[in-house]
Image: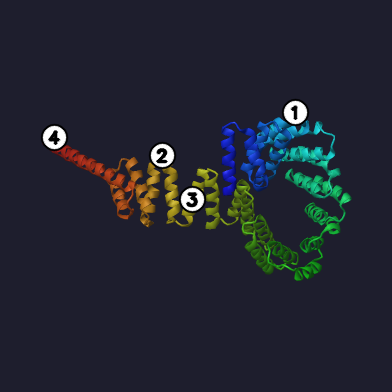
Amino acid sequence: MADIIAILERAQSLTDNEKFEDAYNVLTAAYNQGKNNPEFLEKIALAAQTLEKKDEATKYWEELIEIAPNSIVAYSELQDIYNETNRYKYYLTRAKVKTLNNQVSQAIPDYKKAIDNTQDIKEKDDASILMAKAYEYIGKPMNAIDEYYKIAPHSDTADIHLKIADLYLQDKDKFSAINALQQGLEHYPDDERLKEFIAKLYVETGDVDKAQQFAISELLKIKIKLMQGHNDEAYELLQNVSDKHNDEYYKLLAEYYFNIKDWDNCNESINNFAKYAPNHPLIYQMKSLVCENNNQMHDAHVNRAKMYIAKGQDDVALHEYMLAHNIDKNNVQTIEDIIKLCENAGEKHTAAEFYEKLLKINPKNENALVKSGDFYFDMGEYNIASKYYEKAAEVSRLSEVFLKAGKCFEKLKKEKIAKEYYEKYLSKAPMSAEVELIKAKISKLSDKDTSSDDEGLLEKILSFFSKK
C-alpha cells in the first residue's frame, strides 16, 4: 500500500509539471501492482484520457467499475467515451449515472434507447433486466413483469419465472403467479423451487389436489394431508419430521389436533408455535377458533382482536373488543385493551367513557381516576376534573397526582387547596426544575392567602361598625 501511495504521488508530481506522458508511464509500469486499487485505476484512466488514449482509458474505467460498481466518476467518463464509440453502451451508462444520482425513473428511457441501439440478444436482455429492476424500484411491478417476460425465452434458469411470480404476489395476484410458474415448469420440469412455490400457491387457493402433485417439502405434504382430512396419515408424517424445532412444525401439529378436536393438545401446540413466532397473527386466529369450538365467545373475540392488532388493523380489532365487552361487561382487561386502542386512535371521548366503566367496577382505580381527571381538565371542566383528582390523591402515593390536583384547584382559584396539594407534591417529588417552579408558585399563593385574610378582617370590622 505504501508503494502505491508513493507511485500515485510521483505520478501527480509529474502531472503538475505537465509531464503527462511520463506520469502515464509511471502508472502503467505499476499496473500489476495497483490494478485492484480504485484510486490507482482512476488515476491511470484519467492519465490515458488526457493523452487521448481512449481504448486504454476505456479499459481502465471498465476495470474500475468491476471493483467499484458505484463509481459515478467512472460511469460519467465512460459516458463521454461511449458517446462517440458505442451508442448502446452510451445509453446504458447514462442510465447508470442517473440511477446513481437517484433519478431512477429518468433512467428508464435510456434503457429503452440502449435496447433500440443493439441487435445483440444478450445486450438487449442485459438492458431489459436493468430496466425491470428500475421499474421494481419505482413501484411499477407490472411494467417490470413485461420486461422479465421478454427475457424469459433466452434464460437458461428458472430464476426469471420465479421473479415474475414474486412480482405478481406483490400485486396480490396469486392466479397470475401460478400461471408464471406453470410456464416455468414447461421449460424446467425438474426445478424443485418452481414445484414447491406452485404447490404453496395451490394450497393457498384451496386446490389441494394440484398442490399434492408438486409438493416437495415434508411439511407442505403434511399440510396437504390435513387439508384433505387425512389426519392419521398426516400425524404419521408429523412423527417422522426430521426437524421439529420450528414454528411450521407446531403450526401443523396444532392443525392436526384441531381437526380431531383435541383442544388441550391443540392449545399446547399453539403455545409452542408462539415460542418460535411471537405475535404472529395466526397464533390468535387459531386460539380464536379453539375458543369458538368450546363456546368461549368472549375469548374468541379477544383473540380475534389480537390477530387484527398483529396485522396492523386496529380499527377492526376495536370492533372485536367491543363484541367481547358486550359479552362480559365486567372484564377489566378487555376494557383496558379498548381504552388503549381508543387512545392510540385519538378517540378521547370513547376512552373516557370506558374509564368510567372501570371506575364502576373499582372506584379506587388510580389510573382511571387520573385519566378521567386529565380528560375533563383538557376540556376545561375543572370542577369535574378536581373531583377525580381528589379521589386519586386519596389512594395514590405518586407525586404527579398531587401536582395535577394542585394545578386544577389553581385553575379554580382555590389557592389554599392548591397550595396544600403542591406541598404534598413537594414532599414526595425528586429534585427537578418543576419542583423549583412549584416552590415559587407556593410562595405566590401564600401571598394571596395573606392578602385574602386581610381583606376578610377589614370586611368584618366594617360590618361590626355598620351594625352599631
Assess disc 3: are there few (<14), some (14-19) or many (≥20) residues with their C-alpha within 10 Å of its C-alpha: many
Q: Under tag 4, what secondary structure? A: helix
Residue 144 or 64: which is nearer the viewer?
A: 64
Give percent across and percent down for residue 105. Answer: 69, 33
Res. 71 in view: no
Instruction: Return the residue at label 3.
Output: 355
Q: For mark 1, what is the residue?
A: 84
Which mark is first along the chain, 4 or 2? 2
**Residue visible at 37% across and 55% down?**
398
Q: Relative to 100, is 318 above or below?
A: below
**In the foreground, 462 or 129:** 129
For label 3, the SS is helix
Measured in 3D between alpha carbons, the distance from the residue under mark 4 to the one under mark 1, in whole angstroms, is 113 Å
- Decide: marks 2, 4 in contact (CB < 8 A)? no
- Residue 380 disc label: 2
Q: Identify the mark nearer the N-term, 2 or 3.
A: 3
